[in-house]
């Protein structure tokens, strides 16, 4: 029998994409696994992604516990009592992650990296080949690429990454040297910038008639959650929305639609409204709703970043702050820029 007849679609996410769906309990994970299933594929988890995702889950739990303890401390001062969260500090997140993956059965495939893959990844780093650069050595990404190549030897791989190390100058395809490896070996590796791009490739978009009502509700819920988050990181106020993009996808259970929104706002000083905006807030928000119900649920602020203008001498100072959003614990990525330097067009 022709080997091509037995090929399976294997979806490989880099660690950044896996981090968008902590413990695969996010509604985006439900959407992704639903589409992988109906397309006869599996989610392939390479060794390096598994290790990195496990470590990030531990870190995320620590930040969530710290944020919860701070909030509950304030509640105790106000009302005299509040539950304890310390028990979560002893949770073995790595073991919990493995157990969660096992719940998906054959829909998820774990793989171990071989000594030969470690060696080839090291050789890529020493040579400065993508995903490494002359001054940016990326062993973990090089190992991930070696694992992707092995998977593509027997199956069709859809590699989901927006990491510039893997991509060409305009991020529309694999870097030239990686693409040459794929072509020389006769492999099938498609690259997609994010999970939503993969879903659009599979033709899973929806165009609901009631989307204006859904978008109005999602905007209102998102703004409330983002406003609360901003109190943790800056004294400025969330200003007007300057950009918005919505995607709709069919998901489980039947009749349910997943909606994702990329929202952008100005960050302003309300005491001096005549001043120019002091920064930009960018958020990725998601929710689900049932057709005909016209009420969004599972609203979650999944990613939140602040490009903040400050008088600080350094051009760029990054950091993360754990905050509580309507969907649970989130991380705000803060990027501070010199107020005398241009940020980017609003």
Image (spheres, helix red, strand yellow):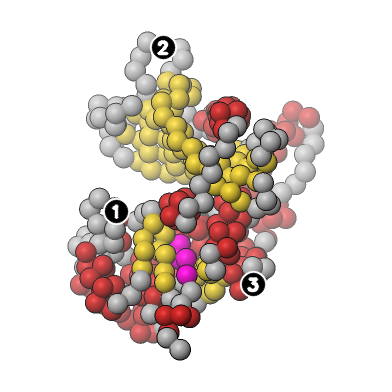
Q: Is the residue marked by circle 1 packed among few (<14), some (14-19), or many (20+) residues within 10 Å? A: few
Would you say residue 85 is visible in this rendering? yes
Q: Which mark is residue 105?
A: 3
Mark 3 crowd level (few <14, some 14–19, many ≥20, 10 Å Cα): few
| Vertical position of residue 263 compared to residue 157: above or below | above
Q: Which residue is mark 1?
A: 172
Is 48 situated left or right of 60 in this image?
left
Q: Which residues are magenta?
A: 9-13
Q: Which mark is residue 117?
A: none
Q: Residue at x 36, y 60 (%)?
A: 191
- The answer to whether 197 appears left or right of 171 in the picture is right
Measured as percent of width and height from the top left, residue 198 is found at 45, 55
Quote the CA–CA distance across marks 2 and 3.
Answer: 57 Å
Question: Considering only order in the chain, which callout, 2 or 1, is on the residue closer to the N terminus?
Answer: 1
Judge left or right: residue 76 versus residue 46.
right
Relative height, residue 111 to residue 318 (above, below): below
Q: Residue at x 72, y 33 (%)?
A: 75
Q: Mark 2 or mark 3: name the one nearer the start of the chain.
A: 3
Q: Secondary structure at mark 1?
A: loop
Q: Is residue 16 visible?
A: no
Pointer 2 residue: 272
Nearer the observer, 153 or 25: 153
Residue 24 in percent (x, y) is at: 60, 58
């Amino acid at each position: 029998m022709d080997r091509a007849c037995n090929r399976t679609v294997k979806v490989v996410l880099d660690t950044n994409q896996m981090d968008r769906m902590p413990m695969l309990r996010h509604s985006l994970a439900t959407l992704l696994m639903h589409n992988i299933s109906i397309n006869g594929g599996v989610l392939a988890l390479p060794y390096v992604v598994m290790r990195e995702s496990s470590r990030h889950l531990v870190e995320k739990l620590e930040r969530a516990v710290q944020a919860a303890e701070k909030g509950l401390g304030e509640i105790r001062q106000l009302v005299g009592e509040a539950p304890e969260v310390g028990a979560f500090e002893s949770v073995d997140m790595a073991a919990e992650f493995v157990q969660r993956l096992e719940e998906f059965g054959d829909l998820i495939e774990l793989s171990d990296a071989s000594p030969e893959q470690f060696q080839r990844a090291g050789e890529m780093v020493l040579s400065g080949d993508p995903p490494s650069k002359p001054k940016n050595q990326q062993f973990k990404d090089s190992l991930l690429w070696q694992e992707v190549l092995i998977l593509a030897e027997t199956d069709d791989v859809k590699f989901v990454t927006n990491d510039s190390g893997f991509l060409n100058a305009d991020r529309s395809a694999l870097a030239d040297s990686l693409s040459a490896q794929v072509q020389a070996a006769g492999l099938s590796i498609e690259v997609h910038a994010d999970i939503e791009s993969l879903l659009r490739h599979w033709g899973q978009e929806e165009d609901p008639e009631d989307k204006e009502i859904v978008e109005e509700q999602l905007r209102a819920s998102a703004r409330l959650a983002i406003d609360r988050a901003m109190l943790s990181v800056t004294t400025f106020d969330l200003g007007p929305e300057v950009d918005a993009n919505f995607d709709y996808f069919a998901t489980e259970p039947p009749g349910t639609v997943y909606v994702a929104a990329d929202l952008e706002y100005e960050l302003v000083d309300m005491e001096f409204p005549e001043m120019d905006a002091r920064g930009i807030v960018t958020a990725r928000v998601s929710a689900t709703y049932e057709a005909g119900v016209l009420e969004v649920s599972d609203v979650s602020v999944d990613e939140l970043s602040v490009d903040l203008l400050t008088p600080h001498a350094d051009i760029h100072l990054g950091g993360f702050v754990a905050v509580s959003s309507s969907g649970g614990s989130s991380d705000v990525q803060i990027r501070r820029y010199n107020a005398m330097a241009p940020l980017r067009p609003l």
